[in-house]
Amino acid sequence: MFTAVATYYSAAVSQDQLHQSREDAERERRSQAVRVSYWTEDPIAHAMRLHLMNRSPDPVTGVSVGLYVQKGESGDDLDEEPGYGDLYADLPNMPPCSEMLIKSESLRWHVPDGTTTRKLPADARVTIQWMGFVDRDSNEWLRQDGELLPFFENPPSGVTKVKVDHGRG
């Protein structure tokens, strides 16, 4: 009888240690990703400033953002659906402890024929929907709706690629 009770408690302790070990591994896996985030200053396109931050001591690569653009009073839409457009932009890698500032005037979107790009309408409302990036261990992450999610398990849906003009201006 004593052996059965001792075996039961030994199994319970082992199970608890395994659970703790898994939690520690997940916390370590997310340690860099929790230090990467974004915020916007103003949703109106002519004044919108998007801040992307990497507060970790390691660079992040494969940075991309998804933006939602809603037309303003001008009625200048980004796609055939009235009132909105989903945009996607690939961005440069982010060095450690850095902030990247994207102003709306640097955003261009490809027209459907793919040969030309256009600026966002000045009165459009721009909101960031998600940010994707790759951490130092090659884990791909998605920041969306205040959550940090593994990218491949939660890919963002149907977006149109956008070019960011990194020239000085």
Image: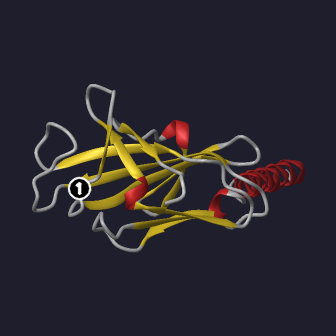
Q: Nearer the viewer, residue 103 or 41?
A: 103
Q: Nearer the viewer, residue 45 or 167?
A: 167
Left or right: residue 48 compared with residue 44: right
Residue furthest toward the right? 3
Q: Nearer the viewer, residue 8 or 125?
A: 125
Q: How is the image coloured?
A: secondary structure
Q: Secondary structure at mark 1?
A: loop
Q: Would you identify the image quadrant in which residue 52 lies?
A: bottom right
Residue 112's x, y, as percent?
26, 29
Q: Nearer the viewer, residue 165 or 86?
A: 165
Please name the residue shown 45% across and 38% down the image.
155
Residue type at the position of mark 1: Pro
| Total marks placed | 1
Q: In the picture shown, does residue 85 fall above or below 112?
A: below
Q: In the picture shown, does residue 110 fall above or below 122?
A: above
Left or right: residue 111 compared with residue 35: left
Residue 151's x, y, as percent?
54, 42
Please name the residue shown 14% across and 36% down the image.
80
Quickly name the residue at label 1. Answer: 121
Residue 19's x, y, as percent?
73, 53
